[in-house]
Image (cartoon, rainbow, N blue to C red):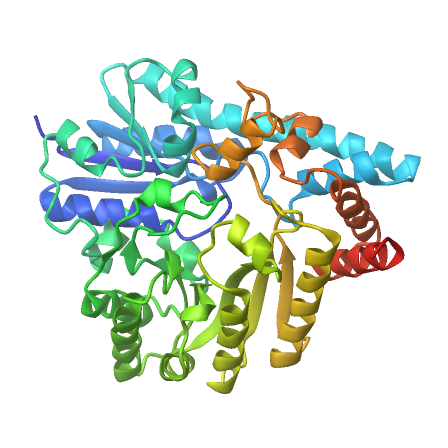
Amino acid sequence: MSRERILIVRLPCRKVFPTGPVYLMSLLSRASPHLALKLLDLALVEHRRRGEALEDAIRQHSPDLLAFSWRDMQIFSPQDVDGGLRDAFIFFHDPSPARRMGAAFRGLRDMISYSSAMGENLRLIRTAARAHPDLEIALGGPSVKIFGDRLSDSLPRRVKLFPEQGLDRFFQSIGLSLPDHPEEPGVDLSAVERSFPQWPAYRGEAIGVQTKQGCPHSCLYCLYGYLEGRRVVRRNPARVVQEIGSYARLWGARRFWFADAQLLSEHADHAHLARILEGLEHEKLPIQWGGYLRIHEVDHALGRLMVRSGLTDLEVSLNSGAQEVVDELRLGFSVDQAMKGFRVLKESGYAGKVLVNLSLNAPGETRQTLRRTLERVEEIKGIFGPDRVMPVVFFLAIQPHTGLETRALEDGHLGKGYDPLSVLPWNVLRLIYNPPPLGDIIGRSCARAFAAGGGSDLILDMIAREIAAGPA
């Protein structure tokens, strides 16, 4: 029996445009145009009002299916901007008892806050299930794909769990046929506005647009291949251009983020991306865009097209300046190729920001490889200018279903049956891959940088001092 009225609820997370729920809603409309759809984004609702907002939405829309989407779940983001991670490094590595004590109190607050956030999401689902016993309830999203096996015992049995790539099962369960080419959501902004009355909250924010699904690579720490599959399925470039044009013309959107696992994931993506950018250029849209890029794939022609079409923000995972570490991470490129890509982009006229992700103390790291990473960062700053390059110290998070998890279990870094959702600070440090002998050097450097109010640049400076003072 097909459903007639569906309420999609994005559970609380940081404020970022709900690309996934909007695409799901659009795909549902493609499958059955008569559906009455509503999207409630709890990321936009004050904490105290979330339960009330959910109940109001259920009462007003009278759905026969309530579909929750859970985006973020793990306690930390493995980068230096995460407060919980900062406090863990300070508590374990800072020599100052006063700063360690402060970090302990903040860490306790972080633990309580995280536990409360997890509990709130579960409570929202359980409360809806209890208050509406006849309402069918589904739960999906990337966190369900990764951690779903740990959620089932905390939810009523009638809540059906659907992983990120479970669209076919989800559509079948609600009596609909999954449309052909499900990678094409068919976004109709007039329909989105009717179904998503909160949309004005994203005026001026970056709008996420996906040009393809899937990632062919098997990087040691990454979940994209697991979440989206290894087969790359590309969207029709004209449809992507049309979608961006609709946001620009109807909503006045000027900033866009290509939400692919990565742009130019393989050489076959060159022509696809070029057709999209040529379309944007032809439409003369006054936009700026950014994305996560495998920079070694850029050539001069594509680089110039990227710049002309509005590229202003770029994120690149170099991870390390040492080839042996890049190979250990199974990244599938050479450091020399990546450095050439940076130079090609600069020669193509790029004058925007460059975020360079660095996974310090990855498998295979030594003092010598750290030195080479520091040298490469200075080389990148020399290409673009130091004010345009932002290194981001991005510690590897050990997450389920990754090669890094397998390796950490085999090496004894993690014990069998470990809890990937633990809130305890000593477990948080275990879930960040920063093993000895370099773990103490990097930990001390992070603690000192954090105590001084600095970020990644200062961390790298502290590490440079540590390894300069140590053995060759």
| 440 vs 149: above or below | below
Which of the two residues, 223 or 290, is positioned nearer the viewer here? Answer: 223
Q: Is residue 150 visible?
A: yes
Locate residue 445, reporting x and y percent: 80, 50
Which of the two residues, 116 or 132, is positioned nearer the viewer here? Answer: 116
The residue at the point 17 percent across, 36 percent down is: 168
Q: Name the quadrant of the C terminus.
A: bottom right
Locate residue 308, reporting x and y percent: 39, 84
The residue at the point 56 percent across, 69 percent down is: 354
Tell me where residue 234 sits by quadrant.
bottom left
Q: Is residue 174 visible?
A: no
Locate residue 50, reporting x and y percent: 46, 33
The number of numbered badges drawn on the structure is: 0
The residue at the point 29 percent across, 68 percent down is: 250
Q: Name the quadrant of the N terminus.
A: top left
319 relative position to 33: left or right: right
Locate residue 116, reporting x and y percent: 57, 26
61 relative position to 314: left or right: left
| 452 vs 169: above or below | below
395 relative position to 13: left or right: right
Which of the two residues, 101 or 395, is positioned nearer the viewer here? Answer: 395
Tell me where residue 153 sits by quadrant.
top left
| 304 vs 59: above or below | below
